[in-house]
Amino acid sequence: MNATSHEKIYDRVIKKPEQMGSYSESDVIFLLKNLSEINLEKETNDREQAIQSGVHYSEMLPVEYQPTPEYIQLFKDTLDESAEKVALAAGVVAELIMKKRGGNVALISLARAGTPIGILIKRYITFRYQIDLPHYSISIIRGKGIDENALKYIFQQHGLDTPLQFVDGWTGKGAIRKVLIDACRDFKDKYDISLDDDLAVLADPGFCSDTFGTREDYLIPSACLNSTVSGLMSRTVLRHDLIDQDDFHGAKYYKEWLGDDLSNHFIDVVAGYFPKIATAAEEEAIKMISLPAEVTWQGMKDIESIQREYAISDVNLVKPGVGETTRVLLRRVPWKILVDRMDNPNLNHILLLAKDRNVPVEVYPGLNYSCCGIIKPLKGEIE
Protein backbone atom coordinates (compact mmCIF):
# COMPACT_ATOMS: atom_id res chain seq x y z
CA MET A 1 0.00 0.00 0.00
CA ASN A 2 1.54 3.31 -0.98
CA ALA A 3 1.74 6.39 1.26
CA THR A 4 -0.52 8.47 -0.99
CA SER A 5 -3.34 5.97 -0.67
CA HIS A 6 -2.80 5.82 3.09
CA GLU A 7 -3.13 9.61 3.27
CA LYS A 8 -6.35 9.58 1.23
CA ILE A 9 -8.07 7.40 3.83
CA TYR A 10 -6.94 9.79 6.57
CA ASP A 11 -7.17 13.05 4.57
CA ARG A 12 -9.94 14.20 6.88
CA VAL A 13 -11.44 12.75 10.02
CA ILE A 14 -14.90 11.34 9.35
CA LYS A 15 -17.06 12.46 12.25
CA LYS A 16 -18.70 9.99 14.59
CA PRO A 17 -22.22 9.05 13.47
CA GLU A 18 -25.32 10.06 15.38
CA GLN A 19 -26.97 7.16 17.19
CA MET A 20 -29.98 6.03 15.17
CA GLY A 21 -32.40 3.14 15.06
CA SER A 22 -34.03 0.92 17.64
CA TYR A 23 -31.20 -1.63 17.87
CA SER A 24 -28.58 -1.48 20.60
CA GLU A 25 -25.23 -0.06 19.48
CA SER A 26 -23.75 -3.33 20.77
CA ASP A 27 -25.63 -5.01 17.88
CA VAL A 28 -24.95 -2.50 15.08
CA ILE A 29 -23.79 1.05 14.43
CA PHE A 30 -25.53 2.84 11.56
CA LEU A 31 -23.12 4.94 9.51
CA LEU A 32 -25.90 7.17 8.16
CA LYS A 33 -26.83 10.84 8.35
CA ASN A 34 -30.07 11.51 10.20
CA LEU A 35 -32.67 12.98 7.83
CA SER A 36 -35.63 12.30 10.11
CA GLU A 37 -36.92 15.87 10.08
CA ILE A 38 -37.06 16.13 6.28
CA ASN A 39 -40.15 15.21 4.27
CA LEU A 40 -38.84 12.72 1.71
CA GLU A 41 -41.82 10.41 1.22
CA LYS A 42 -43.84 10.26 -1.98
CA GLU A 43 -47.07 8.35 -2.50
CA THR A 44 -46.57 5.07 -4.37
CA ASN A 45 -47.98 6.16 -7.75
CA ASP A 46 -46.14 9.51 -7.68
CA ARG A 47 -42.89 7.81 -6.73
CA GLU A 48 -43.30 5.17 -9.45
CA GLN A 49 -43.96 7.88 -12.03
CA ALA A 50 -40.85 9.75 -10.88
CA ILE A 51 -38.62 6.65 -10.96
CA GLN A 52 -39.78 5.63 -14.44
CA SER A 53 -39.29 9.22 -15.62
CA GLY A 54 -35.64 9.15 -14.59
CA VAL A 55 -35.57 10.39 -10.97
CA HIS A 56 -33.21 8.15 -9.01
CA TYR A 57 -34.95 5.98 -6.43
CA SER A 58 -32.47 7.10 -3.73
CA GLU A 59 -33.65 10.74 -3.95
CA MET A 60 -37.01 10.04 -2.29
CA LEU A 61 -38.63 7.50 0.00
CA PRO A 62 -41.78 5.43 -0.31
CA VAL A 63 -44.55 5.96 2.20
CA GLU A 64 -44.01 3.06 4.60
CA TYR A 65 -46.65 0.36 4.27
CA GLN A 66 -48.78 0.15 7.40
CA PRO A 67 -49.61 -3.53 7.72
CA THR A 68 -53.08 -4.71 8.59
CA PRO A 69 -53.58 -6.76 11.78
CA GLU A 70 -54.02 -9.81 9.52
CA TYR A 71 -50.65 -9.17 7.90
CA ILE A 72 -48.88 -8.64 11.24
CA GLN A 73 -50.33 -11.94 12.39
CA LEU A 74 -48.98 -13.54 9.20
CA PHE A 75 -45.52 -12.14 10.00
CA LYS A 76 -45.69 -13.61 13.52
CA ASP A 77 -46.92 -16.97 12.23
CA THR A 78 -44.18 -17.02 9.58
CA LEU A 79 -41.57 -16.19 12.20
CA ASP A 80 -42.80 -19.00 14.44
CA GLU A 81 -42.67 -21.46 11.52
CA SER A 82 -39.33 -20.42 10.03
CA ALA A 83 -37.21 -19.09 12.93
CA GLU A 84 -35.20 -22.31 13.25
CA LYS A 85 -34.62 -22.43 9.48
CA VAL A 86 -33.46 -18.79 9.49
CA ALA A 87 -31.23 -19.48 12.50
CA LEU A 88 -29.60 -22.40 10.67
CA ALA A 89 -28.96 -20.28 7.56
CA ALA A 90 -27.49 -17.47 9.72
CA GLY A 91 -25.36 -20.02 11.55
CA VAL A 92 -24.07 -21.52 8.31
CA VAL A 93 -23.12 -18.06 7.01
CA ALA A 94 -21.44 -17.14 10.30
CA GLU A 95 -19.46 -20.40 10.30
CA LEU A 96 -18.40 -19.82 6.69
CA ILE A 97 -17.22 -16.29 7.55
CA MET A 98 -15.18 -17.53 10.52
CA LYS A 99 -13.62 -20.35 8.53
CA LYS A 100 -12.87 -18.21 5.46
CA ARG A 101 -11.97 -14.89 7.11
CA GLY A 102 -11.09 -15.56 10.74
CA GLY A 103 -12.07 -13.69 13.89
CA ASN A 104 -10.56 -10.31 13.00
CA VAL A 105 -13.19 -9.38 10.40
CA ALA A 106 -15.58 -6.42 10.58
CA LEU A 107 -19.16 -7.12 9.51
CA ILE A 108 -20.55 -4.53 7.08
CA SER A 109 -24.29 -4.86 6.52
CA LEU A 110 -25.85 -3.22 3.49
CA ALA A 111 -28.70 -1.06 4.77
CA ARG A 112 -31.38 -1.84 5.29
CA ALA A 113 -32.25 -5.47 4.50
CA GLY A 114 -28.76 -6.59 5.45
CA THR A 115 -28.89 -5.08 8.94
CA PRO A 116 -30.95 -7.70 10.81
CA ILE A 117 -28.99 -10.45 9.07
CA GLY A 118 -25.68 -8.89 10.12
CA ILE A 119 -26.93 -8.72 13.71
CA LEU A 120 -27.86 -12.41 13.63
CA ILE A 121 -24.41 -13.32 12.28
CA LYS A 122 -22.70 -11.16 14.91
CA ARG A 123 -24.82 -12.68 17.70
CA TYR A 124 -24.09 -16.23 16.49
CA ILE A 125 -20.33 -15.62 16.43
CA THR A 126 -20.47 -14.16 19.94
CA PHE A 127 -22.48 -17.18 21.12
CA ARG A 128 -20.34 -19.79 19.36
CA TYR A 129 -16.84 -18.28 19.51
CA GLN A 130 -17.04 -15.65 22.28
CA ILE A 131 -15.78 -13.05 19.78
CA ASP A 132 -17.47 -9.65 19.60
CA LEU A 133 -17.04 -8.52 16.00
CA PRO A 134 -17.56 -4.88 15.04
CA HIS A 135 -20.72 -4.48 12.96
CA TYR A 136 -21.71 -1.45 10.90
CA SER A 137 -24.62 -0.80 8.59
CA ILE A 138 -23.78 1.33 5.55
CA SER A 139 -25.45 2.45 2.32
CA ILE A 140 -24.96 1.05 -1.16
CA ILE A 141 -27.12 2.34 -3.99
CA ARG A 142 -27.66 0.95 -7.47
CA GLY A 143 -26.36 3.47 -10.00
CA LYS A 144 -24.46 5.48 -7.34
CA GLY A 145 -22.22 3.01 -5.53
CA ILE A 146 -21.13 2.49 -1.94
CA ASP A 147 -20.72 5.12 0.78
CA GLU A 148 -16.96 5.75 0.71
CA ASN A 149 -17.09 7.98 3.79
CA ALA A 150 -18.53 5.05 5.74
CA LEU A 151 -15.69 2.80 4.58
CA LYS A 152 -13.15 5.49 5.47
CA TYR A 153 -14.68 5.80 8.94
CA ILE A 154 -14.40 2.04 9.49
CA PHE A 155 -10.74 2.00 8.44
CA GLN A 156 -10.01 5.06 10.61
CA GLN A 157 -11.52 3.24 13.59
CA HIS A 158 -10.06 -0.23 13.04
CA GLY A 159 -6.97 0.15 10.86
CA LEU A 160 -6.30 -0.41 7.18
CA ASP A 161 -5.55 -4.12 7.56
CA THR A 162 -9.01 -4.98 8.91
CA PRO A 163 -10.79 -7.36 6.52
CA LEU A 164 -14.40 -6.43 5.78
CA GLN A 165 -17.24 -8.91 5.24
CA PHE A 166 -20.22 -7.43 3.42
CA VAL A 167 -23.63 -8.81 4.40
CA ASP A 168 -27.10 -8.58 2.84
CA GLY A 169 -30.39 -10.38 3.32
CA TRP A 170 -30.84 -12.24 0.03
CA THR A 171 -30.12 -12.03 -3.69
CA GLY A 172 -32.59 -11.33 -6.48
CA LYS A 173 -31.08 -10.67 -9.89
CA GLY A 174 -27.73 -9.98 -8.24
CA ALA A 175 -27.84 -6.24 -8.99
CA ILE A 176 -26.41 -5.20 -5.61
CA ARG A 177 -23.66 -7.83 -5.84
CA LYS A 178 -22.67 -6.26 -9.18
CA VAL A 179 -22.71 -2.76 -7.63
CA LEU A 180 -20.51 -4.10 -4.82
CA ILE A 181 -18.04 -5.67 -7.29
CA ASP A 182 -17.76 -2.35 -9.13
CA ALA A 183 -17.49 -0.38 -5.86
CA CYS A 184 -14.66 -2.59 -4.57
CA ARG A 185 -12.78 -2.18 -7.84
CA ASP A 186 -13.23 1.61 -7.72
CA PHE A 187 -12.09 1.72 -4.08
CA LYS A 188 -8.95 -0.21 -5.02
CA ASP A 189 -8.24 2.21 -7.89
CA LYS A 190 -8.72 5.26 -5.67
CA TYR A 191 -7.15 4.16 -2.38
CA ASP A 192 -5.08 1.09 -3.29
CA ILE A 193 -6.99 -0.97 -0.72
CA SER A 194 -8.34 -4.34 -1.83
CA LEU A 195 -11.84 -5.09 -0.54
CA ASP A 196 -13.30 -8.58 -0.82
CA ASP A 197 -16.53 -8.23 -2.84
CA ASP A 198 -17.91 -11.49 -1.40
CA LEU A 199 -21.48 -10.78 -0.29
CA ALA A 200 -22.71 -13.02 2.52
CA VAL A 201 -26.48 -13.61 2.35
CA LEU A 202 -28.98 -15.89 4.05
CA ALA A 203 -30.58 -16.93 0.75
CA ASP A 204 -29.01 -16.89 -2.71
CA PRO A 205 -31.71 -17.97 -5.19
CA GLY A 206 -29.97 -15.83 -7.83
CA PHE A 207 -26.83 -18.07 -7.68
CA CYS A 208 -24.60 -14.99 -7.48
CA SER A 209 -22.94 -15.29 -4.05
CA ASP A 210 -20.12 -17.47 -2.70
CA THR A 211 -21.21 -17.22 0.95
CA PHE A 212 -24.83 -18.13 1.64
CA GLY A 213 -27.00 -20.15 4.01
CA THR A 214 -29.25 -21.67 1.35
CA ARG A 215 -30.22 -21.23 -2.28
CA GLU A 216 -33.85 -22.00 -1.60
CA ASP A 217 -36.09 -19.02 -2.36
CA TYR A 218 -38.01 -18.96 0.88
CA LEU A 219 -39.52 -16.25 3.02
CA ILE A 220 -37.08 -14.65 5.44
CA PRO A 221 -39.58 -13.04 7.85
CA SER A 222 -37.63 -9.76 7.92
CA ALA A 223 -38.60 -9.32 4.25
CA CYS A 224 -42.27 -9.20 5.28
CA LEU A 225 -42.06 -5.75 6.83
CA ASN A 226 -40.14 -2.54 6.25
CA SER A 227 -38.73 -0.30 8.97
CA THR A 228 -40.51 -2.09 11.83
CA VAL A 229 -38.24 -5.11 11.37
CA SER A 230 -35.13 -3.11 10.39
CA GLY A 231 -34.49 -0.98 13.46
CA LEU A 232 -37.12 1.62 12.41
CA MET A 233 -34.78 2.82 9.67
CA SER A 234 -35.87 3.98 6.23
CA ARG A 235 -34.19 3.08 2.99
CA THR A 236 -31.04 5.06 2.39
CA VAL A 237 -31.07 8.44 0.63
CA LEU A 238 -28.47 10.16 -1.50
CA ARG A 239 -29.37 13.64 -2.67
CA HIS A 240 -26.71 16.28 -3.17
CA ASP A 241 -28.75 19.06 -1.56
CA LEU A 242 -28.93 16.94 1.62
CA ILE A 243 -25.62 15.05 1.67
CA ASP A 244 -22.33 16.93 1.36
CA GLN A 245 -18.84 15.54 0.79
CA ASP A 246 -18.17 14.96 4.50
CA ASP A 247 -21.50 13.23 5.22
CA PHE A 248 -22.56 9.63 5.24
CA HIS A 249 -25.47 8.75 2.99
CA GLY A 250 -28.75 9.55 4.74
CA ALA A 251 -31.77 7.79 6.20
CA LYS A 252 -34.73 8.51 8.44
CA TYR A 253 -35.33 7.03 11.88
CA TYR A 254 -39.06 6.52 12.44
CA LYS A 255 -39.17 6.94 16.21
CA GLU A 256 -42.93 7.46 16.06
CA TRP A 257 -43.40 3.73 15.37
CA LEU A 258 -41.57 2.46 18.44
CA GLY A 259 -44.83 0.97 19.71
CA ASP A 260 -45.10 -1.19 16.57
CA ASP A 261 -41.43 -2.14 16.35
CA LEU A 262 -40.68 -5.85 15.92
CA SER A 263 -36.98 -5.47 15.07
CA ASN A 264 -35.52 -6.82 18.30
CA HIS A 265 -38.29 -9.39 18.64
CA PHE A 266 -37.27 -10.89 15.28
CA ILE A 267 -33.60 -11.06 16.34
CA ASP A 268 -34.33 -12.54 19.75
CA VAL A 269 -36.69 -15.24 18.42
CA VAL A 270 -34.25 -16.40 15.73
CA ALA A 271 -31.16 -16.19 17.97
CA GLY A 272 -32.97 -18.33 20.54
CA TYR A 273 -32.44 -21.31 18.19
CA PHE A 274 -28.64 -20.92 17.94
CA PRO A 275 -27.84 -23.55 20.62
CA LYS A 276 -30.04 -26.05 18.78
CA ILE A 277 -28.62 -25.53 15.27
CA ALA A 278 -24.93 -24.80 15.98
CA THR A 279 -23.57 -28.30 15.33
CA ALA A 280 -25.56 -28.68 12.10
CA ALA A 281 -24.46 -25.18 10.97
CA GLU A 282 -20.79 -26.01 11.41
CA GLU A 283 -21.14 -29.35 9.63
CA GLU A 284 -22.90 -27.70 6.69
CA ALA A 285 -20.26 -24.97 6.47
CA ILE A 286 -17.43 -27.52 6.42
CA LYS A 287 -19.22 -29.41 3.64
CA MET A 288 -19.72 -26.20 1.62
CA ILE A 289 -16.06 -25.25 1.93
CA SER A 290 -14.92 -28.70 0.77
CA LEU A 291 -17.36 -28.62 -2.18
CA PRO A 292 -17.81 -24.94 -3.10
CA ALA A 293 -21.00 -24.09 -4.98
CA GLU A 294 -20.71 -22.43 -8.36
CA VAL A 295 -21.68 -18.82 -8.98
CA THR A 296 -23.65 -19.17 -12.21
CA TRP A 297 -25.92 -16.07 -12.13
CA GLN A 298 -28.73 -18.50 -13.08
CA GLY A 299 -31.34 -16.11 -11.74
CA MET A 300 -30.48 -13.51 -14.36
CA LYS A 301 -31.17 -16.07 -17.10
CA ASP A 302 -34.70 -16.50 -15.71
CA ILE A 303 -35.22 -12.76 -15.83
CA GLU A 304 -34.08 -12.49 -19.45
CA SER A 305 -36.61 -15.19 -20.35
CA ILE A 306 -39.42 -13.30 -18.57
CA GLN A 307 -38.36 -10.06 -20.25
CA ARG A 308 -38.65 -11.67 -23.67
CA GLU A 309 -41.97 -13.38 -22.98
CA TYR A 310 -43.65 -10.29 -21.55
CA ALA A 311 -41.88 -7.73 -23.81
CA ILE A 312 -40.43 -5.78 -20.87
CA SER A 313 -37.73 -3.39 -22.01
CA ASP A 314 -36.39 -2.35 -18.58
CA VAL A 315 -34.88 -5.20 -16.54
CA ASN A 316 -35.32 -3.11 -13.38
CA LEU A 317 -39.09 -3.67 -13.64
CA VAL A 318 -38.59 -7.40 -13.00
CA LYS A 319 -37.97 -8.25 -9.32
CA PRO A 320 -37.33 -11.96 -8.70
CA GLY A 321 -37.47 -13.85 -5.45
CA VAL A 322 -39.69 -13.80 -2.38
CA GLY A 323 -37.89 -10.84 -0.80
CA GLU A 324 -37.94 -8.64 -3.90
CA THR A 325 -41.55 -9.57 -4.77
CA THR A 326 -42.56 -8.55 -1.26
CA ARG A 327 -40.93 -5.16 -1.80
CA VAL A 328 -42.78 -4.73 -5.10
CA LEU A 329 -46.09 -5.33 -3.34
CA LEU A 330 -45.23 -3.11 -0.37
CA ARG A 331 -43.81 -0.05 -2.13
CA ARG A 332 -44.07 -0.15 -5.92
CA VAL A 333 -46.94 -0.33 -8.45
CA PRO A 334 -47.20 -4.05 -9.31
CA TRP A 335 -48.44 -5.27 -12.70
CA LYS A 336 -48.54 -8.98 -11.94
CA ILE A 337 -46.91 -11.65 -9.81
CA LEU A 338 -45.46 -14.82 -11.32
CA VAL A 339 -45.19 -17.91 -9.10
CA ASP A 340 -43.63 -21.33 -9.60
CA ARG A 341 -46.75 -23.03 -8.22
CA MET A 342 -49.81 -21.87 -6.31
CA ASP A 343 -49.33 -24.30 -3.41
CA ASN A 344 -45.77 -23.17 -2.59
CA PRO A 345 -45.76 -22.67 1.21
CA ASN A 346 -43.31 -19.76 0.87
CA LEU A 347 -45.98 -17.69 -0.87
CA ASN A 348 -48.68 -17.25 1.78
CA HIS A 349 -47.84 -13.60 2.48
CA ILE A 350 -47.32 -12.88 -1.23
CA LEU A 351 -50.81 -14.16 -2.05
CA LEU A 352 -52.30 -12.16 0.84
CA LEU A 353 -50.60 -8.95 -0.27
CA ALA A 354 -51.54 -9.52 -3.93
CA LYS A 355 -55.17 -10.01 -2.94
CA ASP A 356 -55.04 -6.89 -0.72
CA ARG A 357 -53.71 -4.82 -3.64
CA ASN A 358 -55.79 -6.54 -6.33
CA VAL A 359 -52.75 -7.75 -8.27
CA PRO A 360 -53.13 -10.80 -10.58
CA VAL A 361 -51.06 -13.89 -9.85
CA GLU A 362 -49.96 -16.25 -12.66
CA VAL A 363 -48.16 -19.60 -12.59
CA TYR A 364 -44.89 -19.50 -14.57
CA PRO A 365 -43.65 -23.10 -14.91
CA GLY A 366 -39.93 -23.74 -14.52
CA LEU A 367 -39.27 -20.54 -12.56
CA ASN A 368 -35.97 -20.78 -10.66
CA TYR A 369 -37.46 -18.62 -7.90
CA SER A 370 -40.58 -19.15 -5.81
CA CYS A 371 -42.02 -15.98 -7.34
CA CYS A 372 -41.26 -12.85 -9.33
CA GLY A 373 -42.87 -9.42 -9.10
CA ILE A 374 -43.29 -7.34 -12.24
CA ILE A 375 -43.66 -3.59 -11.80
CA LYS A 376 -46.23 -1.89 -13.98
CA PRO A 377 -44.59 0.19 -16.75
CA LEU A 378 -46.19 3.62 -16.76
CA LYS A 379 -45.14 4.48 -20.30
CA GLY A 380 -47.40 2.05 -22.08
CA GLU A 381 -45.02 -0.59 -23.36
CA ILE A 382 -47.14 -3.39 -21.89
CA GLU A 383 -50.80 -3.51 -22.82
Image (spheres, rainbow, N blue to C red):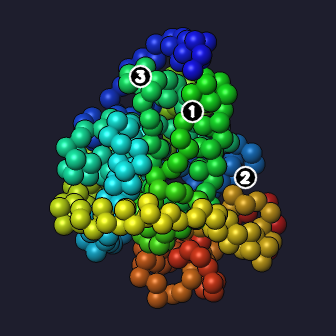
In the image, residue 87 sits, relative to residue 132, either above or below, namely below
Give the residue type at disc 1.
Answer: Ser
Mark 3, Cα crowd under 10 Å, few <14 / some 14-19 / many 20+, is few
- Please give the residue where the numbered disc 3 appears in the rendered image: 159
Element type where label 3 sits in the image: loop
Query: Which of pointers 1 and 2 indicates the residue nearer the eye?
Result: 1
Tell which of 293 and 15 is nearer to you: 293
Q: Earlier in the sequence, mark 1 or mark 3?
A: 3
In the image, residue 324 sits, relative to residue 127, either above or below, namely below
The percent position of residue 29, horizontal first and vertical second, equals 34, 34
Tell which of 232 and 160 is nearer to you: 160
- Please give the residue where the numbered disc 2 appears in the rendered image: 52
Query: Which of pointers 2 and 3 indicates the residue nearer the eye?
Result: 3
The residue sitting at 35% across, 67% down in the picture is: 284
In the image, residue 14 sits, relative to residue 151, either above or below, namely above
Mark 2, Cα crowd under 10 Å, few <14 / some 14-19 / many 20+, is some
Give the residue type at disc 3.
Answer: Gly
Q: Is residue 366 visible?
A: yes
Labels 1 & 3 near each other (Cβ < 8 A): no
- Position of the N terminus by quadrant: top right
The residue sitting at 34% across, 36% down in the picture is: 104
The residue sitting at 74% across, 45% down in the picture is: 54
The percent position of residue 220, horizontal first and vertical second, equals 39, 65
Q: Earlier in the sequence, mark 2 or mark 3?
A: 2
- Please give the residue where the numbered disc 1 appears in the rendered image: 194
Q: Earlier in the sequence, mark 1 or mark 2?
A: 2
